Amino acid sequence: MDLHAIPPRFFKPETLAELFDVPVETVYQWRKKRTGPPGFRVGRHVRYHPDAVQAWIDQQMTADLSQAA
């Protein structure tokens, strides 16, 4: 396992809520409905890989732009 590939910090749901200016409950609903960035469990806690969050943002922007055209 390449420890250099591990990001310095995974995001918590609260971090995503702050990033997107939405309630934390919205982040949990995205996960439940599988409409938000993919998360993973570490014990009882949900975490988000920064690259997965960025990929989800890029996907949302692309979808939004294609709908506007």
Image (cartoon, grey):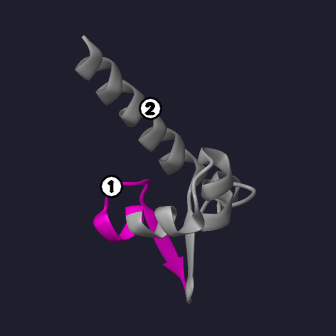
Left of 37 or right of it: where is 14? Answer: right
Q: Are marks 1 and 2 in contact (CB under 8 Å)?
A: no
Q: How many marks?
A: 2
Q: Is residue 13 above or below residue 64?
A: below
Name the residue rendered at 41%, 28% in the picture.
61
The amino acid marked with disc number 1 is Thr
Magenta residues span 30-42
Q: What residue does disc 1 label?
A: 35
Is residue 42 shown left or right of residue 35? right
The residue lying at 33 percent from left, 55 percent from top is 35
As drawn, which residue projects farthest toward the top? 69
Residue lying at the far front in this picture: please name it: 23
Mark 1 → mark 2, Cα distance in angstroms: 14 Å
Q: Which residue is mark 2?
A: 58
Viewer-proximal residue, 57 or 68?
Answer: 68
Q: How many residues crowd mark 2 within 10 Å: few (<14), some (14–19), many (20+)?
A: few
Question: What amino acid does circle 2 point to?
Answer: Asp
Q: Quadrant of the C terminus?
A: top left
Residue 16, by quadrant, is: bottom right
Is residue 39 left or right of 7 when viewed as pictured? left
Question: Is 67 rendered above or below residue 4?
Answer: above
Q: Residue at x 65, y 60 (%)?
A: 11
Q: Is residue 32 magenta?
A: yes
